[in-house]
Image: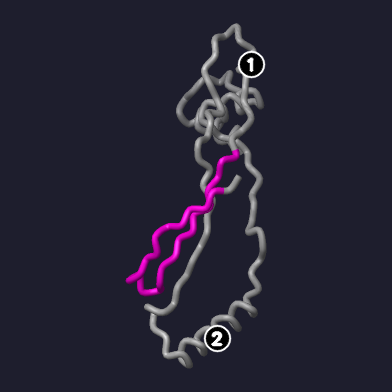
Amino acid sequence: MIQQKALNFNSKLGGSKKIQAGSGWLEKFKNRHGIRQLSIVGDKLSSDIEVGNRFIAELQDLIVKGKLTADHIYNCDETGLYWRPLAMKTLAAENEAVASGRKKMKDRVAILGCANASGSHRVNLTLVEKK
């Protein structure tokens, strides 16, 4: 499709009639503009809507029975952060075929964030080093 569009633009703009927009041209175009092909990845796990709806109903019931407010309800989530990363690329002279490498660093911390539903109480971030 990109090749056909390139030919259409070339024609509309009065470009050279010699242009073929072949596979070699397409590869150079993608490299020049940083275009790459990736696999599309969906959610790791699908959500069960019925179970989610039951949970919401049960939670609302607990909130009413316990006379809870947004100040009483907390949510926490964890994410990972890799630190001390090493460069994955380097500049090299044209006579150098490879750059000596190192093992990829795996220094990682887990970061836990927590706050109440009203936002009035935000717990300080908690960091846990993982090796």
Residue 111 colored in magenta in the image: yes
**Disc sitting over residue 98 in the figure:** 1
Q: Nearer the viewer, residue 91 or 75?
A: 75
- Residue 56: x, y in percent? 54, 81
- Residue 5: x, y in percent? 55, 36
Quadrant that contains the C terminus: top right
Q: Which region shows up in magenta? A: 106-129
Quadrant that contains the N terminus: top right
- Secondary structure of the residue carrying numbered label 2: helix
Q: Nearer the viewer, residue 2 or 11?
A: 2
**Disc sitting over residue 57 in the figure:** 2
Q: Amino acid at mark 1?
A: Val
Residue visible at 64% across and 30% down in the picture = 103
Outermost left residue: 120
Q: Residues within 10 Å of mark 1 (few under 14, many from 20)?
A: few
The answer to whether any part of residue 21 appears in the image is no
Q: Circles 1 and 2: CB distance less than 8 Å?
A: no
Q: Look at the magenta stretch and give its main secondary structure.
A: strand
128 left or right of 27 in image: left
**Disc sitting over residue 110 in the figure:** none
